Image (cartoon, helix red, strand yellow):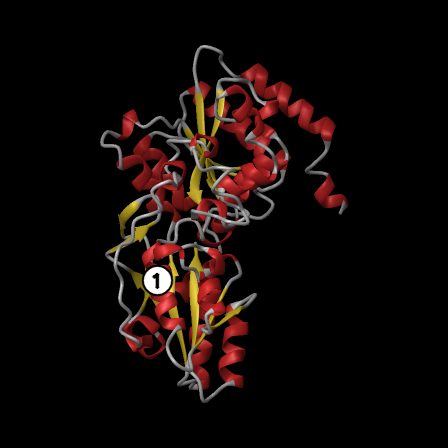
Amino acid sequence: MKYIEAFRDGELARRLAAAIHAEADPARPYRLMEFCGGHTHAIARYGLPDLLPANIRLIHGPGCPVCVLPAGRIDSAIALAREPGLILCTYADTLRVPASGGVSLLKARAAGADVRMVYSCGDALAIAQANPERQVVFFAIGFETTTPPTAAVILRAQQLGLANFSVFCNHVLTPAAMVHIMESQGDPDAVALDGFIGPAHVSTVIGYGAYESFAARYRRPVVISGFEPLDVMQSILMLARQLNAGRAEVENQFSRVVSREGNRKAQAICEQVFELRDEYDWRGLGTVPLSALRIREEYADLDAEQRFALPYRQVPDHKACECAAIQRGQKQPADCRAFGTACTPERPLGACMVSSEGACAAHFTYGRFRAANHNGDAA
């Protein structure tokens, strides 16, 4: 606990806040996007915007794995779960994401589908071993952080010769989404983002070197940040100093965990099992080229999409939900008319309110919407 508390020290936070105020040029804006939902959660939980100058604005990105999962993929998982005798295994937050007609995996389970929450893909493999007479599918989602365990479980299932186990792969890639955000509005120079707080856990796998071409191409600094409040504050200070100096480099605040090259062993196992998809739909971002992984043909017998010939169709989000604009950084949660009224963590309309790392759930949980509702401006 002492190690954690060192990154939550109030006096150090005040010093960092003072340094940021001293560094911030009042004549210019600092529009910084935190890509990762873990950072969004920390920013809301610890009230970091209250410590910053008014011209430093933190903009929420799409970096919650549950939030970017398109409704059509949930529909495919529900179709799988309804297969007679099949067991569908998935992570907890995925159960509650609304898909077509407001149906979710949780509602499908209530209607009789055998949908089971697991803490790891290894749990799903164990369920398959314990139920050899039934097909078991692991609904795999997440960024590069959760991809290596999925690759390992596929290799283990092949080694065991499990004929009743397969994976519905929905792993997506962070750098491709960052590129899409910069390209999606036409002229990248016109995008109202000045810098990025880079993801932490993702970077332990892919390394901070993976963002160097992005920073150089789009002339936007990236600082890889830890998740504690002082980590984020220091990263904001580092970004402000880069922007003031006219630099656009990748810096690593989270040096106690992240290296430039990342986890080579994890990268190798992912390369062995997966290959790039030509394109993939992201909730909020639309179709993003070369942004997701599929299982290689050598492991096709463990690919649920091939085994069950899974259907997929694009499904529009709820008309009242502003998740798409929030995940692109164009709106704040409080800009959505449904936020905190028709849409709450107990009854979410969109994915941003489902996961605790979603921008809407973080704002709602920690009261970041109250000032917005009172003043009429985004928090």
Whole-percent x, y for residue 107 in the image: 46, 63
**Furthest-right residue in this view:** 2
Residue bearing mark 1: 75
Considering depth in this image, is 298 or 210 the residue closer to the camera? 298
- State left or right for residue 337 relative to residue 309: right
**Furthest-top residue in this view:** 27
Q: Secondary structure at mark 1?
A: helix
Considering depth in this image, is 146 or 59 the residue closer to the camera? 59
Q: Is residue 213 visible?
A: no
Which residue does the image show at 42% across and 54% down from the upper left? 98
- Work out whether 256 lies above or below 275: above
- State left or right for residue 17 relative to residue 162: right
Which residue does the image show at 41% across and 37% down from the upper left? 326
Q: How many marks?
A: 1
- State left or right for residue 93 relative to residue 155: right
- Work out whether 369 lies above or below 98: above
**Three-letter code for the amino acid on which mark 1 is drawn:** Asp
Residue 62 lies in what quarter of the image?
top left
Considering depth in this image, is 293 or 126 the residue closer to the camera? 126
Q: Is residue 119 visible?
A: yes
Which residue does the image show at 40% across and 41% down from the upper left? 323
- Work out whether 351 lies above or below 295: above
Whole-percent x, y for residue 23 in the image: 54, 17
Whole-percent x, y for residue 254 in the image: 56, 42
Whole-percent x, y for residue 307 in the image: 30, 77
Considering depth in this image, is 252 or 280 the residue closer to the camera? 280
Residue 170 lies in what quarter of the image?
bottom left
Which residue does the image show at 77% across and 44% down from the upper left? 2
